[in-house]
Image (tube, coloured by chain):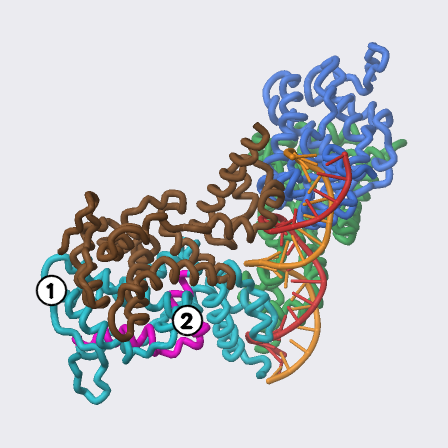
Chain colours: A green, B blue, C cyan, D brown, E red, F orange
Amino acid sequence: MQKRDREATRARLLEAARLRFARQGYDATSVRDIARDSGVDATLIFRYFGSKKQLFDQATAAARPADLLEGPQEELVARMVRTVVDHDWTEYGGEHPLVAMLRSSAHEDARQRIRKEVCDTYVNALRDLAEGEDAELRAELLSAWMVGIGILRSVVATPALAEARAADLAPHIATVATGLLGRPMSGTVDQRGESSQT
Amino acid sequence: MQKRDREATRARLLEAARLRFARQGYDATSVRDIARDSGVDATLIFRYFGSKKQLFDQATAAARPADLLEGPQEELVARMVRTVVDHDWTEYGGEHPLVAMLRSSAHEDARQRIRKEVCDTYVNALRDLAEGEDAELRAELLSAWMVGIGILRSVVATPALAEARAADLAPHIATVATGLLGRPMSGTVDQRGESSQT
Amino acid sequence: MQKRDREATRARLLEAARLRFARQGYDATSVRDIARDSGVDATLIFRYFGSKKQLFDQATAAARPADLLEGPQEELVARMVRTVVDHDWTEYGGEHPLVAMLRSSAHEDARQRIRKEVCDTYVNALRDLAEGEDAELRAELLSAWMVGIGILRSVVATPALAEARAADLAPHIATVATGLLGRPMSGTVDQRGESSQT
Amino acid sequence: MQKRDREATRARLLEAARLRFARQGYDATSVRDIARDSGVDATLIFRYFGSKKQLFDQATAAARPADLLEGPQEELVARMVRTVVDHDWTEYGGEHPLVAMLRSSAHEDARQRIRKEVCDTYVNALRDLAEGEDAELRAELLSAWMVGIGILRSVVATPALAEARAADLAPHIATVATGLLGRPMSGTVDQRGESSQT
DNA sequence: GATGAATGAGTATTCATTCAT
DNA sequence: TATGAATGAATACTCATTCAT
């Protein structure tokens, strides 16, 4: 029971931290805020995580759906769009984790975390798909689009993108992705195992 | 190092503020930092600007080349790319001002500033060019790309984009923009009055 | 000098605050002064009281002997005089708390506190005793005298009043009070249960 | 013309200082406030008066109607009441100057000024009138009343006193003053040279 | 092991005052 | 002489973190 509580408290702290860091960024979030949200004493944060920074690292780690990189290759871009647009990021204050972390990008550590996350999640996966010369550049350009869509949706909240679902974006995405990667890409994810070309 | 020179001191403060706010964001920047960078007493910031927030507003205002929205329409997207990629943003720590402001987006005020900047600079101008249905959405998608490219270049610093010049991106941009807007767009800006279609 | 003792620290802070606020008023007293007097870190003031203003409120609250309004009615004025003249206000720097608060009367909040204190302690109680017309005015006039005596004693420190004991004032007080209230008032408080008319 | 302006500026500064110090007390008033009120640069205060403190001294000096101590002796108390109740203290923010200075009584200098003012204006004059033993004490008691009335009127603003005119207080004052001083005192001031006993 | 008292460096901001022009 | 730029110490208050119990 002791251990159970400890784990539960840890989890609550992580959850609260995720939300606060996402919404307010690293600097504007105090360890006391997080402790209060979790209903525990602030000291526990130091006992459990060592420091505010380490809590931040753990709270923002692995912010990517596990199945993003699995499934048919021609649906990869469509899955990415769904991750950015349709995924439920309630835990991160409703914003894409990358956007949330961007808010803390004043700190070199966070910046490196973002760098790694973007490369692992988007650039590297897309580069593997790109044909011909300039593969890296074209993969990055497509990655930039994913990130940009996330930003405009949640931070800027431009009217059309903020309301759009992945399906609304599908046709445009498919065209562009196909053009950039030099191979046919599907705009939507086939839920039953089939991919539907747009 | 002039002394007793209001305008010079003001300018130095603005310059230092621009750099600090861009690199570290609003919260991580202290007025004392800025004052120290400028070699003046921190009190002057309040004399000249009223408050840290007002200094931030002034330091991040009008962060757009004046001629962006002027010139041939078919070169608009190309000019945007040059603004993001080739423009000398040394004053903003080498990063696109939008990226810099994004770092302060924990504050609702800054967020609204970003919103306005993105709409005025990108979305509205592009919407006017887009043909057919979904004009708003397609304009936003293209805007998202511009913003995303800026982010990946400076925050994430992905290898290809970080080194790329606008000319390297031109072919890809032109294709995508033409497709999204439904009208021919040039990939490069014709310096001599001619536009070269890609 | 106990350590790690919340209540003792709180009490020491309140005591020091009472003294400082009484002697110097709100503005001229800094939280650092109070902390230094108490031998603790200034941060604790905010931990325990929230703000300087809240500390002020608590430090100056309930500055009236509990038994003032109890006892024989004809001795009420005499008890008031004793409160002003004989009571040991060491905690308030030797001055009547009203005088101390008067020193902070630049702030509307403090002014309202004074207003309430004067009305609750003096005016209302005396009005209930006054007979005939003009009861309110006569009650206020007598209240004004009590307050004025407190001021002259401690702020102005006029020679006779500063040295006087309640017993010295008794004969004059009794005459005036009897005249103003329209009913016989005793000048002294009968310690053995008897009241002696002067 | 130069000199004229200088004098006019000095006068405006004194006037503004009087008002601010009276309303807010010494600490809550800044030299910049006063300068702004007067429409001049704050530096002039130091040129003309040397320091904030010296300005305070000059601004609060001689705050007593010149004719208070002149006229028939039996009307002295009545004149005092008029000074406290009917006099137009607009220059002092509508409050009796003593009350205003009381607000700054945190500072020993101001306290001594108050002391002197009260003694010169009230106590000494009344002591000269008092007959028999205890003259000093009875003079002080009557002075305390005057001061207390001023306080309750303006700071506490008790309902009856705040609205009262000197004439309303006259009957009560006359009775008490006569009793305390041991000689007949008039309650009102005879404007045509006659005194009317109440 | 866990609570919370304590700390000291940090924050933005305002002050009276001086000094250069 | 007079303007206003500059100063540095002070203000209330918050921070992440430590240490005693």
Q: Tell whether B8 sits left or right of C147.
A: right
- Farthest-out residue, bottom: C192
Amino acid at pointer 2: Glu
* Mark-to-mark CA distance, 1 and 2: 32 Å
C180 inside magenta stretch: no
Q: Quadrant of residue D127?
A: bottom left
In the image, residue C83 sits, relative to residue D66, either above or below, namely: below
Residue C111 position within the rendered picture, expressed as x and y whole percent measured from the top left: 37, 57
Q: Tags 1 and 2 in contact by the CB under 8 Å rule?
A: no
Q: Provide residue D125's location: percent of width, then percent of height.
A: 33, 61
Question: Which residue position is annotated with label 2?
Answer: C95
Residue, disc 1: C131
- At 43% from the left and 49% from the top, the residue drawn is D23
* Residues tagged by mark 1 and mark 2 found on one chain of the structure: yes
Quarter of the image for the C terminus of chain C: give it.
bottom left
The span shown in magenta is: C73-102
- Residue A56 placed where, x, y %? 69, 58
